Amino acid sequence: MKTRNSILAMAFCAIAFVSCKDEKEAQSEKTVNNYVVYVDSLGNVAEADAKANWQAIDNAYQMRVSEAEAALENMKDKTAAQQKLDAAKAKYEELKSKMEMAAAEASPKQKLRNALFGEGKIGDDMNFAWVNKDNIHNVYQQFIHTVEDNKDKYSREDWDEIKLMYEALDNRKNTVEKEGLSTEDNMKIAGLKVKFAPMLKVNRIGAKGEEQAEAKK
């Protein structure tokens, strides 16, 4: 009787093990298929919307492709899944190349805004609604460090645009402060602003002076 029970227990474990493996493989296949569907869906996104939200799209893509590649390792027969993965990757790279070319063709003003805030974050509508209490310190950091790193390359028009964007960001900060901006982040931003204000003033005046001197030649 004991022998019979042992055999039954072993058989049950074997069935459970196979079932578990089958379920794991099915889930892996589903993950790969979801990745392929996501890439296919990007082809239906309007180009203007894709450009405006490219960073979010790419972040989502990187997460999904990583999940798909990890899922592939749990599959017995990887051939078909690998082909799907490779085809979707190629399709995405084609889309990415198209977006990069579109960005390269952007106006000088838009290129500057992309550098200051991130690809497509600020368009002609100057909508700062995406800046919130959780990311505003990072937004200020990127903006100010980008200007600092490139201050010797900017024209008078660039500095005028930088001033406009800086004032718009400050206006957004006034709203964010009422929405729960932490004291710590507020102090960090204040420190960045103290450093940035004189740099903006001096370089903007300098760029105008250089332009006037050049015009007199």
Image (cartoon, rainbow, N blue to C red):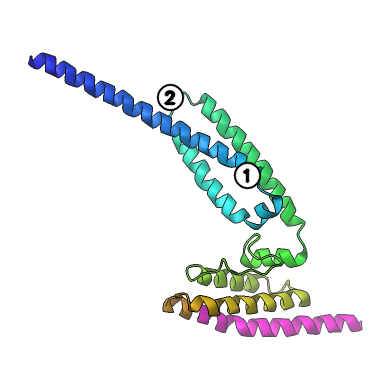
- Identify the magenta region: 189-217
Q: Is residue 29 visible?
A: yes
The vertical placement of 36 against 79, above or below, is below
| Residue furthest right as drawn | 217
Q: Residue 180: where, in percent of width, then height?
A: 44, 75
The vertical placement of 9 against 106, above or below, is above
Examine the structure image and report whether residue 77 is included in the region drawn in magenta: no
Rendered residue at 17%/16% (across/down): 7
Q: Is residue 149 toward the left or the right of residue 5 in the image?
A: right
Q: Nearer the viewer, mark 1 or mark 2?
A: 1
Q: Residue 207: where, in percent of width, then height?
A: 76, 80
Q: Is residue 156 toward the left or the right of residue 198 in the image?
A: right
Rendered residue at 35%/27% (across/down): 21
Q: Residue 184's image quarter?
A: bottom left
Q: Any mark on residue 10, and which?
A: none
Amino acid type for the residue under numbered disc 2: Lys
- Name the residue carrying label 2: 76
Q: Residue 133: where, in percent of width, then height?
A: 48, 71
Q: For the residues marked 1 and 2, what is the alpha-carbon distance in whole angstroms?
A: 29 Å
Q: Residues within 10 Å of mark 2 (few under 14, many from 20)?
A: few
The vertical placement of 90 against 202, above or below, is above
Q: Is residue 155 visible?
A: no
Examine the structure image and report whether residue 206 is included in the region drawn in magenta: yes
Pick the front one: 193 or 29: 29
Rendered residue at 66%/44% (across/down): 44
- Name the residue carrying label 1: 42
Numbered disc 1: secondary structure: helix
Disc nearer the start of the sequence (1/2): 1
Q: How many marks?
A: 2
Q: Residues within 10 Å of mark 1 (few under 14, many from 20)?
A: some
